[in-house]
Amino acid sequence: MPRSRWTERLGQLGLAALYFGVLTPLGRCVRAVRDPLRRSWDADRAGYLEPPAGAGPRRGPGPGLPRPGRARRFSGRRA
């Protein structure tokens, strides 16, 4: 049985009422209790930059880069 235009509108109004009546106030309450982005000011911190997760200390320039102090020589020929 095909749905009429009115049942589609009622469905859209029901979803809008659910969103604005339940989800929006719930989200505002959660943000009032906890700040997920940690935007608060902390005077004791020296800086706010955090290293990416899993990043360890770097030991060298990385693959494919020349090491410091050792220049590559260009012979003029292509291999």
Image: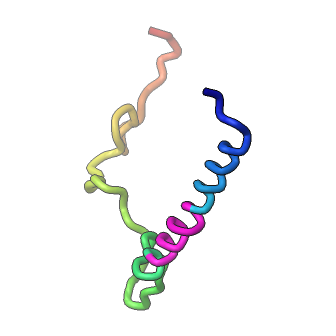
Q: Indicate whether 28 appears above or below 5.
A: below
Colour scheme employed for the rendering of this structure:
rainbow
Looking at the rendering, in which quadrant would you find the N terminus? top right
- Left or right: where does residue 26 sit relative to residue 11? left
Q: Please provide percent x and percent y for residue 65.
A: 40, 36
Q: Please provide percent x and percent y for residue 46.
A: 40, 82
Residue 48 visible in the displayed image: no
In the foreground, 41 or 32:
32
Task: State the residue at coordinates (30%, 46%).
Answer: 60
Q: Please provide percent x and percent y for residue 57.
A: 27, 56
Magenta: main secondary structure: helix
Furthest toward the bottom, the residue is 43
Task: State the residue at coordinates (66%, 44%).
Answer: 7
Furthest toward the front, the residue is 1
Task: State the residue at coordinates (56%, 69%).
Answer: 21
Q: Indicate whether 11 appears above or below 46.
A: above
Q: Indicate whether 45 appears above or below 17.
A: below
Give yes or no for residue 28 being in the magenta stretch. Answer: yes
Q: Which residues are magenta?
A: 18-29
In the foreground, 78 or 12:
12
Give yes or no for residue 21 being in the magenta stretch. Answer: yes
Q: Please provide percent x and percent y for residue 74.
A: 48, 23
